[in-house]
Image (cartoon, helix red, strand yellow):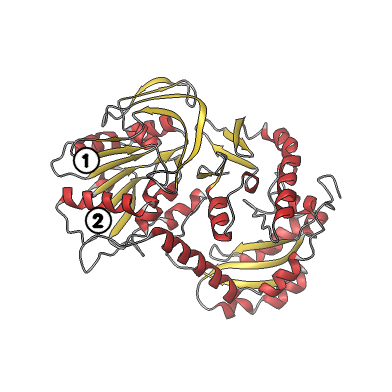
Amino acid sequence: MSNHAAVTADGGEVGRAQAMQAYAAGVPLDRRMNPVLLKPAADGTSHLVVLGEEVGRAGSRGYREQARDLRGTVLDALVGLRREHDWVVAEGAGGAAEINLLDRDLVNLPLAAAAGIPAVLVVDVDRGGAYAAAYGTLALLPGHLRRTVRGVVFNRIRGDASLFADGFAAFEEVAGVPVLGVLPHLGERPMLGAEDSLDLDAAYALGEADGGHGVDGADPLSVAVLRLPRLANPSDLDPLVCEPGVAVRWATRPADLAGADLVVVPGSRATVADLDWVRARGLDRALRDLATTPHGPVLLGICAGHQMMGAMIHDDLESGRGSVPGLGLTPVVTTFRAPKIVRQVGAGCPGGYEIRWGRPDPDAYASADGSVRGTSIHGCLDDDATRHELLAAVASRRGRPWPGSDVCFADLRDRHIEELADWLEAHLDLEVLDDIAATAVAVGSEPGWDAP
C-alpha cells in the first residue's frame, strides 16, 4: 500500500520501492514485482492496481474477498520471477503477525507458505522492545506460518551492538530461531526512494543532514515543500536533497514558507482533496502573496501540484466534485478523464514518467519571468541539466550566490546503493542467509494457498 509509484517500460504502474530495488539489482522493472498495489484515496478506499493496471477501488471491508481472488495472480507473479532469476526477494509489508488480517494477507508469511519459500523476520530495535516484538510475533503465528521463519534480523540499533547481542542465546533458546545479525542505525542521512509515508519525515528531513549545508561557506538555497496529506511520489525531491548547496524542508503552514527560495507543490493521489487542505491551512493565500512579491521565491508544481496551481480543475472522475477553482497562480485548466496516463518519458527528461488522470492544458507552464512553473512529469529533476538550470534560475531571481553544481544524481544513487550493500555485508551473516534461501522448494513444486 503506497501512493509512491513508478512506471515500467511497457506502461505499468508499480510501487516506488520496487523500482529502486530493481535498479539496485540491475534488472528491468517488471509489473510482476508488484502484482497488487493499493493506493489510498481521499474517501477511505484505495485504488486497486493489479499487474500494473488500475482496475477499480477497494474498501477496507470489501477487500477481503478481492484479496482471495488475487491469490493466484500474486503466486503466479512470484513463480514467474523465480523461473527467470537466480534470486528473488519477496519483501513483506506491515506486520508479520497481524492475525486480524491473515485471511487477506497476500504479501507476508502466507505468501511464503504458499510459495514454499523461507522467510526472515526483520525487527525494528529503535522503537524499543525488540526481543519481545520478535518473540511475540512468532508466538502469535499459526504453526504453518511460524515454520516459514528461519531467521531474525534486528535493525536500526543505536550505540554498542555487542550489548544487544548478549541476549541472542536466550532469545534463540526460547524462540527456536537463529539471529542472523544486528544492523546499526544509519543515522539521519536521506534514504533515497522512500516508500512508506512514515519514513518521509526522516528520509527528507531534510536538509538538516547531508543537504543542509552550503557550498564553499555560502548559505544554501532554501526549498520548502508542501507536506500534502496524500502526497505522491516524494522521490521527486531526492535530487534536491542530494545537492550540497540546497536545504529542503517540509511546509504545513504559511510560516514554514518564510525565507524559501523555491517552493514546491508536489504530486498527490487526491488532487482536489489536497487542494482543500491547502486552502484550510491558509497556504493558498501565502502562495499567492509569494507569487506577487518582487524577487520572491520560484514556485514549482509537479503533476497534481501543477494542476492545483492552475485556474480551474474539472473533476468528475477522481473526486467527483465537478468544477473546482484552482489556486489561480497560472492559467492552466485541468480536466480529469480516462484512460489513465501511465508512461515513461524519454526525450528531454531521462528518468521522467507520468501517472495521472488529469489533463492540464498546457501540460507544462512557465511564467514570462520564470517565477511560476509547472510540469506533469515526475522525476524531471533526476536530470542533472534540468535541475541545475532550475537552481541557477532560483539563485538569480533571489539575488543569491550560486557557484553552480557538478552533482550527478545517478552517481549519487549508485553510491547510496553500494553503501547499503556494504552495510549488509558488514553486519549480516550472508552465508547463512544463502543457506536459508536454498531451502526454497523447486519452482513448480509450490504447496499453494490451501496447503496446511
Left/right of residue 393 with respect to residue 385 in the rendered view: left
Which residue is rendered at x = 21% and y = 37% of the image? 291
Query: In the displayed image of the protein, which residue is found farthest to the right?
Result: 452
Picture coordinates of residue 451, whole percent (x, y) = 86, 48
Residue 63 makes an appearance in the image: yes
Q: Which residue is mark 1?
A: 370
Q: CA distance from mark 1 to mark 2?
A: 17 Å
Element type where label 2 sits in the image: strand
Please rate how many residues cluster around mark 1, counting C-alpha atoms within 10 Å: few if below 14, some from 14 to 19, many from 20.
some
Residue 31 coordinates in the image, percent (x, y)? 62, 44
Residue 259 appears in view: no
Q: Check the picture and name the quadrant holding the N terminus.
A: top right
N-term mark: 1 or 2: 2
Tell me, yes or no, whether the two marked residues, 1 and 2, touch with CB atoms within 8 Å: no
Please provide percent x and percent y for residue 370: 22, 40
Which image quarter: residue 72?
top right
Q: Which residue is mark 2?
A: 221
